[in-house]
Amino acid sequence: MIHMEEKFSVCWRYHAGQGALVWQLMFTPAGDLVGQKRFSGSRQALFFCIDTLSGMVIRDDYLFFEHHHSSSAIEGGLTLLETTIGNLVYCSAGQLNSPEHQGIWAIDFRSGMVVWSRPDLVFVANLEDEFLVYHASVFAGFPERHFRLIDPFTGVDIRLPGADGLEVNALRGKAVQEEVRQQVTLPEFVMDGMTAERNALQRAGIAETTRCECIVQGALTVAALHEPARLPALWNSSLRVWKNDALVYADTLEEGVEKPGLNNFLIRSDKLYYLKGREELLCVALS
């Protein structure tokens, strides 16, 4: 039995449905969490939106391509959350025979409305007051990219940097990483040289740290421990939180799986978000 002196509490939980895989999460500056979930045997991605303060599900099982099927690029239903601004979330669509995504759809998940769409463009970078995008074409059998800057609130072209590689690279360099923009801290596997993480885990009695993902933030240490199960070739994963080296929260993430789920927790502000069984999302107060 794990002894905990002061237990942190679960603020809310969201179950994506039996057999679901919560695939991607993003946070809007307006205070919403938007994610997508997938089901085995289906190429469709369904979206959900949760108020992070109350845990209220604002929207669930949202398939906007069903009502906005304006481009062959969305064939197959593969989607990606690209970025957020204000109350808008920007999605793109997968292409069946290409690793690149195509199109940009600006969605207000609170209203369920697609505010604007540009299926002809490919998203590159969020520069806050404008997006760097490009239009793909082929000339003499060779692919070309025609870059432009668009307004993130209307999708309208602002100007065309065109083929100026130096300016395009400079614009790319101005872009802030998405986790930094959304004030999210992601875990890292504990490697040699990560002194703070290794020391924190060893103080907690975790001698084997190479199979741990960890975040150390002030007095808090959060770790996912991936350990071999009793049956060969299977894994168990658990989540633990220590405050000032005292265990304050613990949960089982998965048991008896062939491949443990990785990168399944994060910290934003004073909340911990994590996936349990890949189909349930929990929010825990870290104070």
Image (cartoon, rainbow, N blue to C red):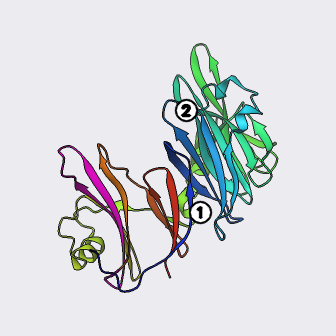
Is residue 126 visible to the viewer in this orientation of the structure? no
On residue 100, the disc is 2
Mark 2, secondary structure of its residue: strand
Residue 44 in picture, x, y percent from top left: 59, 33
Q: Please, what is the three-letter code of the amino acid marked with disc 2? A: Glu
Q: Measured from the top left, where is residue 36 in percent x and y?
A: 59, 46
Question: Helix or strand or loop: what does disc 1 sit on?
Answer: loop
Query: Going by the picture, which residue comes out furthest to the top?
Result: 140
Q: Earlier in the sequence, mark 2 or mark 1?
A: 2
Number of other residues with Cα within 10 Å of mark 2, as a class: few under 14, some 14 to 19, many 20 or more: few
Q: Identify the image quadrant of residue 123.
A: top right
Q: Is residue 225 magenta?
A: yes
Q: Give left or right: position of 104 versus 268.
A: right
126 horizontally vs 267: left or right: right
Q: Which residue is mark 1?
A: 182
Quadrant of residue 276 within the rendered picture: bottom left
Residue 59 appears left or right of 213: right
Q: What residue sits 65% from the left and 29% below the top?
A: 74
Give residue 146's position: percent from left, percent from top: 67, 32
Q: Which residues lie in the magenta part? A: 224-247
With 260 as the anchor, is 149 left or right in this view? Answer: right
Q: Is 207 included in the stretch rendered in magenta?
A: no
The quadrant the N terminus occupies is bottom left
Label annotation for residue 265? none
Q: Residue at x 52, y 48 (%)?
A: 22
Looking at this view, is 6 or 186 the one in front?
Answer: 6
Residue 165 spot, x, y in % from top left: 59, 40
Whether residue 69 is visible: yes
Q: Residue at 65% across / 59% down in the picture? A: 50
Magenta highlight: main SS: strand
Work out whether residue 75 or residue 139 is closer to the camera in this orientation and state it: 75
